[in-house]
Amino acid sequence: NLILAIETSCDETAAAVIRNGNEIVSNVVSSQIASQTRFGGVVPEIASRHHVEKITLVIEKALKDANLDPEELDAVAVTEGPGLVGALLIGINAAKAFAFAHGLPIIGVHHIAGHIYANALVQSMEFPLLALVVSGGHTELVLMKEHGHFEVIGETRDDAAGEAYDKVARVLNLPYPGGPHIDRLAHEASEGVVFPRAWLEDSYDFSFSGLKSAVINFKHNMEQRGEKIIPEQVAKGFQDSVVEVLTTKTVRAAKEFQVKQVIAAGGVSANKGLRTSLEQAFAKEEIPFYVPPLNLCTDNAAMIGAAAASMYNASVRGNLSMNGNPGMELKSWSKE
Ligand code: ATP
Ligand code: FE
Ligand code: MG
């Protein structure tokens, strides 16, 4: 099947054409990070305005790059949630208009299912599979017994990993989004400041707010003593704590559920420290581990098309009454 996919849940306006759920025919992403950097985060009204300005161009470019007529498509897919409601609606309305104009079915995709299915674009998913989802708004361990089956076995009790990265970056006066900057600084230090790890006993849940507070307190205490912090050492200490907890829990879950494959997904899986740590840990355990290339880890529409292809095969269809669902839950679409 051939699917046009649209993603506007946050600060990327994106469209892509995906063939059979595993081949990227075209993939267009217009980022507004530059305009959001000035505000140190995403401002919903600005995000919506940017989507309105770009959406038509982005969709046209995705079709042109794919070199095909709308008549050749089988469906239109769009991120239905979660995300900023105003931002979601712009993609959804564009998708509805396109679907109506060309008589195509519309499929509403969960953004996190999209992040997970980014992996289907680089390799064939084998089940049972464990996905570590680490993004700006989510930190979850998801068990999949088959395509379209999702069981959240652990999740963050407070901040998401990406959120923690962005907040700590702000403490270090680094630009938004902070993840890549902390990653870079962390690799410039040989010694990191020692920060706590939140293990939460045997749970597969996560917590990052204590770590964030520890970083803030460390800076505060240093300043009170008239000393300067070394940002590289703080970045490394913070990243080491995040990476060690994420890696340890993912390995433990992979063994407990005897999965055939482990994948990482979401913006924070672009993190070099995390990728290396997971790669080494799973090489040692001899469990296959995959993570998509960087441009498929952060928000894009190709991943939405990949998830939609699996939904299309499972006969899942939306309709033109679709609305933005900012708090949408990750639901399975498999038969069982
Ligand atoms: P969600 O997917 O949960 O709805 P989102 O779409 O805003 O949230 P993503 O776009 O998937 O999140 O990821 C963005 C996050 O990834 C930001 O918090 C950013 O700091 C983080 N990030 C990006 N690159 C890196 C990196 N190299 N290291 C750490 N974090 C990173
Ligand atoms: Fe995302
Ligand atoms: Mg984003």
Image (cartoon, rainbow, N blue to C red):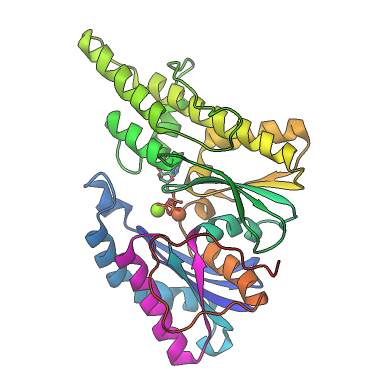
Residue numbers of the magenta segment: 83-111
For the point 42% across and 60% down, which residue is it? 82
In screen coordinates, is 198 left or right of 127?
Answer: left
For the point 51% across and 86% down, which residue is it? 70
- The quadrant of the rendered image in which ligand 2 is seen is bottom left
In screen coordinates, is 67 left or right of 41?
Answer: right
Q: Where is residue 64 in the image (x, y as percent from the top left)?
A: 48, 78
- Indicate whether residue 92 is drawn in magenta: yes
Residue nearer the viewer, 205 or 10: 205
Q: Position of residue 9 (x, y in %)?
A: 39, 62
Q: In this view, does 279 lie above or below 74?
A: above
Q: Where is residue 104 in the image (x, y as percent from the top left)?
A: 52, 87
- Indicate whether residue 16 is drawn in magenta: no
In screen coordinates, is 208 left or right of 153?
Answer: left
For the point 26% across and 58% down, which residue is it? 44
In screen coordinates, is 54 left or right of 255?
Answer: left
Figure quadrant of residue 169 = top left
Q: In this view, does 265 lie above or below 48?
A: above
